[in-house]
Image (cartoon, rainbow, N blue to C red):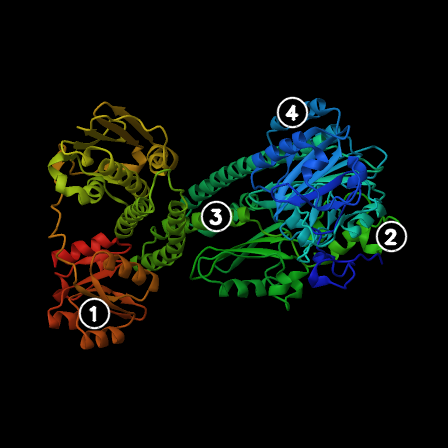
Amino acid sequence: MTRIAVSDASLAGQPIDLTNCDREPIHIPGSIQPHGCLLACDAAARTVQRHSANAASMLGLSGDLIGQPLVDLIGPENLHTLGNALAVAGHEPRPALIFGLQINGRSFDVTGHRYEGHAILEFEPAAQNLGAVMSMARTVVGRLRGMDSAEALIQHAAHLIQAQLGYDRVMIYELGADGAGKVVSEAKQQEHESFRGQYFPASDIPQQARALYLRNPIRVISDASYQPVPVLPVRDSMGAPLDLSYAHLRSVSPVHCEYLRNMGVSASMSVSIIINGQLWGLIACHHYAPKVLTMADRAAAEMVGEFFSMHLDALTRRHARKAEELARRALDDLMVDASRNEDVRNALENRLPDLAKLIDAEGIALWFDGTWSTVGHAPSQTAAEPLLRLAETSPDGQIFHTDQLSAVLPDAADLTRSVAGALIIPLSRRPRDFLFYFRREAEQTLDWAGDPNKTYETGPLGDRLTPRKSFAIWKETVREKSHPWSEADCRFAEALRISVVEVLLFNSELLADERSRAAVRQRVLNQELNHRVKNILAVIRSLVSQKQQPGDTLESYTEALRGRIQALAHAHDQVIRDENGGLLRDLLRAELGPYSAKREGIHLTGPNVALDSRAFSVMALVLHEMATNAAKYGALSQRGGALSVSWTILPCGDCQIRWQETGVPGVRAPETTGFGSDLIRRSLPFDLGGESELSFASDGLLAQFRLPARFARALSDTGAPEETALPAALSGPSGMLEGRRVLLVEDQVLIAMSLEAELTDHGMVVLGVAPSVKKALAMIEQDAPDLAVLDLNLRHETSVPIAEALMARGIPFVFATGYGRDIDLPDSFDAVPVVQKPYQVQDILKAFRAL
């Protein structure tokens, strides 16, 4: 067994072999490859602190290099060139490139980078064909750009890169979710055996190597039998080795060199394929004789690799969008078919072959109303009994998946002999109905290439280092496991679940018995609630993740975010109260109500038009952005400004909304757009297929929105357009609340902390926070407050007893709840203000002033 000395303290004294190579400190090997030399200086590149043992002979120098000024070794002009290159690179560790540097009559290509307090300079004999190298790279990039699918890109890239670099074999190597790799594309000389389609275990690329591939995307081995050139001294005065993570000449693991030699490979090069910050795979090149790749070739290969990664990402995303469109059409067909069929089970059974195509699997099964139906490779109902019991215990509305069913159901041998992975989609609550997708064992579904039993000659590091043996080991690691379920698989499964839920809801409404219909409706709606809440959270996450625009303050960003969430909450509350949506007039009143002090300058005119739930939510955000912009920059920010909003139903049934601001001098279109402007322009066309148009005049803004007829309807009592008045704002002296003592009753600590800080900022005194009725009553008895905010629902109790105690003492208070005014409270509380969550502190202050 080959062994090497280890410089990492955690492994000191331990040899590196196959039992611990995943901990080998490959970033600090203490040596470089011999086709170049290295100088390590201080960060300012003034003085040599370390050097490779071959540096003096390669650079034509003499004497001890340690402590020598770099300018004395390479000359002032070269030092100036290197300094400029390092300055341009800044503090990024990726190397700067200098071509054709003349040192002592010899020409060198140089890479330089700063890392861990060192300026690390690498010198290699200069390439003479720089122009040809860059021209070839541009040709390869141009050819890759013409590929219109990820499959074509992957297959052609290997041949193009082989033509570019001249290696005997070029492979595109993809890493799976479990870390195992597969050769998905290959270009090779005719006499060599093909590796295409072969799998290799995750252990072939240890974790520290994967991390290094992310930091330094290119790695070259010019000769797998090279003798490492030590870097002197091995450790500095503090005992630390030199970190060569970003060095091109860095020595590689002797274990890996042995692996290559066992395959007959003499030289190799790899370029990382990085997508979304993750290591997708490698462009791996093999050569069966030593091969020195020049710095120019490496730079060109790195450029091609980065373009390949970006183009692959773009094509993969495009493919995912097309797949989702196809899935959506299939689901739409399912919904139409099922909605016309009184027997939902029969409709789903007929569509099973189509549903099987939505997700990559070998089999599909439906359990509906106690009947088991299958298509493809699926277990029998008897074998599936343990799986049905597992599905029954899963949380309502949640998809379950596993790629190792035997680990979840160890006693279900009849089932796990047939299938290794399962994805469970719940379709209803009671009775429990499910859709199942099945995958066979991964080892049974491999795309075999060549004879998997063929081996190379065993090397001194053992059989495991030969590629065929690695393959055999990987086969053992995937016993009883399927290929993992991807994020896209789960996304399609969720879309399918929602579609079936909607079908069940539609069919439930056709039942003759009202009591039975209500029960089924409640069952389906309860499942749908979980989906809607997730959607709301996803939208909020998208709002929060938007970057601040240049010039925005944290306060303005926070205020805009609060306003958008408040608009979303208003729309959601309306949809909950009326699942058909709400009136456009009410939405405008809600969004423009905060500016009612300017109500003489705001005119709303139009008939009674109702928007469905989807359009109501979209327009809530759009109109909120319009109102906010008008208050900041437009008509509502000017003394003489005026805002007119009118709407009508066109003959085609579409709803036309006209938003016009006047009296705003000096208006001009913004040079850049932020998230709010993009939301105004793109939400309506993207989400509803409507139109949004903004134009800027010399004294104001004109915006026109067009909603398709399917999202808007004129109510039967619609007559002539009527003027809508805004409510007068409740207000009081700005200082009337300062010094008032407030009790907060809230069982969510984050909400309580936020409100406590904001009330304090407005000059109020928060006596404390009570999470329960008992705690609140004790605090009132000990030190009665001036005002109180009561969260209505406190886990397993309500704050009604607290409200009664406050009312008995004559202490004003406000209810805060996510139910709005729809809550069922005693008549004695009719006059108590109710603030709907999520609220802003201004809502609380407004209610306090009203009290």
Q: CA distance from mark 4 to mark 3?
A: 45 Å
Q: CA distance from mark 1 to mark 3?
A: 43 Å
> On the rendered structure, is 389 left or right of 224?
left
SS for dot 3: helix
- Of residue 493 and residue 812, the one placed in the foreground of this image is 812
Mark number displayed over residue 496:
3
> On the rendered structure, is 744 left or right of 46?
left
Q: Amino acid at mark 3?
A: Leu
Dot placed on the residue nearer the N-terminal end, 4 or 3: 4
Q: CA distance from mark 3 to mark 2?
A: 52 Å
Check the image and name the residue furthest to the right: 457
**Vertical placement of 50 versus 700: above or below?**
below
Screen quadrant of the C terminus: bottom left
Q: Which residue is mark 2?
A: 459
User: Does the residue at mark 4 contact the one at mark 1 (Cβ under 8 Å)?
Assistant: no
Q: CA distance from mark 4 to mark 2?
A: 41 Å
Of badges 4 and 1, nearer the viewer stands: 4
Pinpoint residue 189: horizontal percent, then vertical percent. Answer: 82, 33
Pinpoint residue 204: horizontal percent, then vertical percent. Answer: 73, 51
The residue carrying pointer 4 sits among few (fewer than 14), some (14 to 19) or many (20 or more) residues within 10 Å by Cα, namely some
Dot placed on the residue nearer the N-terminal end, 3 or 2: 2
Q: Which residue is mark 4?
A: 138
SS for dot 2: loop
Mark number displayed over residue 800:
1
Q: Amino acid at mark 4?
A: Arg
Identity of the residue drawn at 36% across and 53% down: 508
Q: Amino acid at mark 1?
A: Val
User: Does the residue at mark 4 contact the one at mark 2 (Cβ under 8 Å)?
Assistant: no
Q: CA distance from mark 4 to mark 1?
A: 74 Å
Pinpoint residue 93: horizontal percent, then vertical percent. Answer: 61, 42
The answer to which quarter of the image holds residue 802 is bottom left
Of badges 4 and 3, nearer the viewer stands: 4
